[in-house]
Image (tube, rainbow, N blue to C red):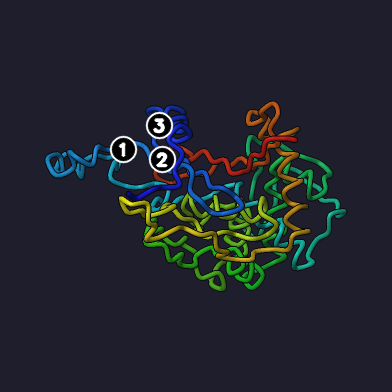
């Protein structure tokens, strides 16, 4: 028997929630990396793929694509917790610095705008993450520059190959940062521009903040067991990256809890559960915007 880490009931919940939408849901045990749910829609019955191959490959909604591990998308504002951690680590800002958001940021000939024309006024880093302030995070990306962003991507494994024969994930697409203009660097700070990631990559970034700074290697196979009960193989947790310090992870985790309590993510609040998160709406050059959410959940008490 091949025993998986997947929770069938949780997977069915994710499947029903996605409904007719194209999308992906991945849920991991933050402490171990065990994949509890990995759902991609639309999906197909593997038993009919050979018969229906021509029709399936011609479909515009790409039902053969596992969007969790192979779909590459701009992350939008879900990238901002990583930028916040990076800016604090690099010392280009502090928890107490006050930013002023007028609703736009001029970068050379390019002007970056807040969504819906908002102007957040004066706010610190926690406020900026809670309100998802584009001006603040674009400013931080400019301060970090190509070198600072590159170091952060290395720490968090963004663009790095994740060796996992069970999942075979695509690496994030990271542009040659040193070749980008200031306007393009500012776009990276808000998860737009030329950065493309998988939903699994964003789950791993969320894991860093929920798991004391460590990103666990995701795995699907819990055990391979013979008929007599002998285990030929058992999955075991292992650390893939130490992305940040426990103290910094706890700080960003607290910021993400505020997003749920009083920010853009209040719809994710669940009674009796400590939920952290970050919402994102990513512009899509070839169609409608992408909706994102990353976060963690832990039963209180």
Residue visible at 61% across and 40% down in the picture = 279
Residue that carries the numbered disc 3 in the rendered image: 21
The alpha-carbon separation of the residues under discs 3 and 1 comes to: 11 Å
- Going from N to C along the chain, the mark reached first, 3 or 1, is 3
Q: Mark 3 or mark 1: which is in front?
A: 1
Q: Quadrant of residue 256?
A: top right
Residue that carries the numbered disc 1 in the rendered image: 43
Screen quadrant of the C terminus: top right
- Going from N to C along the chain, the mark reached first, 3 or 2, is 3
Residue 274 percent coordinates (x, y): 70, 36
Q: Residues within 10 Å of mark 3 (few under 14, many from 20)?
A: few
Q: Is residue 72 left or right of residue 158?
A: left
Residue visible at 55% across and 65% down in the picture = 240
- Front residue of 223/272: it is 223
Residue 271 percent coordinates (x, y): 69, 26
Q: Mark 3 or mark 2: which is in front?
A: 2
């Amino acid at each position: 028997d091949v025993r998986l880490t997947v929770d069938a009931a949780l997977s069915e919940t994710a499947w029903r929630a996605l409904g007719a939408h194209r999308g992906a849901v991945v849920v991991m045990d933050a402490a171990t990396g065990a994949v509890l749910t990995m759902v991609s829609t639309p999906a197909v019955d593997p038993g009919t793929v050979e018969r229906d191959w021509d029709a399936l490959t011609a479909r515009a909604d790409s039902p053969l694509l596992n969007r969790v591990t192979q779909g590459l998308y701009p992350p939008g504002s879900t990238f901002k917790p990583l930028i916040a951690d990076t800016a604090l680590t690099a010392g280009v800002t502090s928890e107490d610095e006050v930013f002023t958001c007028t609703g736009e940021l001029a970068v050379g000939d390019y002007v970056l705008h807040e969504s819906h024309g908002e102007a957040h006024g004066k706010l610190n880093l926690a406020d900026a993450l809670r309100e998802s302030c584009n001006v603040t995070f674009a400013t931080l990306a400019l301060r970090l520059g190509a070198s600072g962003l590159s170091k952060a991507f290395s720490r968090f494994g963004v663009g790095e190959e994740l060796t996992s024969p069970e999942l075979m994930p695509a690496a994030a697409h990271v542009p040659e940062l040193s070749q980008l203009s200031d306007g393009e660097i500012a776009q990276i700070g808000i998860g737009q521009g030329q950065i493309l990631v998988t939903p699994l990559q964003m789950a791993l970034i969320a894991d860093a903040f929920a798991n004391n700074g460590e990103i666990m290697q995701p795995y699907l196979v819990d055990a391979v067991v013979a008929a007599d009960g002998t285990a030929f193989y058992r999955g075991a947790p292992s650390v893939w990256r130490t992305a940040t310090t426990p103290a910094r992870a706890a700080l960003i985790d607290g910021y993400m809890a505020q997003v749920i309590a009083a920010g853009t993510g209040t719809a994710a609040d669940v009674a009796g559960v400590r939920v952290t998160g970050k919402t994102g709406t990513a512009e899509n050059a070839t169609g409608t915007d992408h909706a994102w959410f990353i976060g963690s959940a832990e039963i209180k008490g």
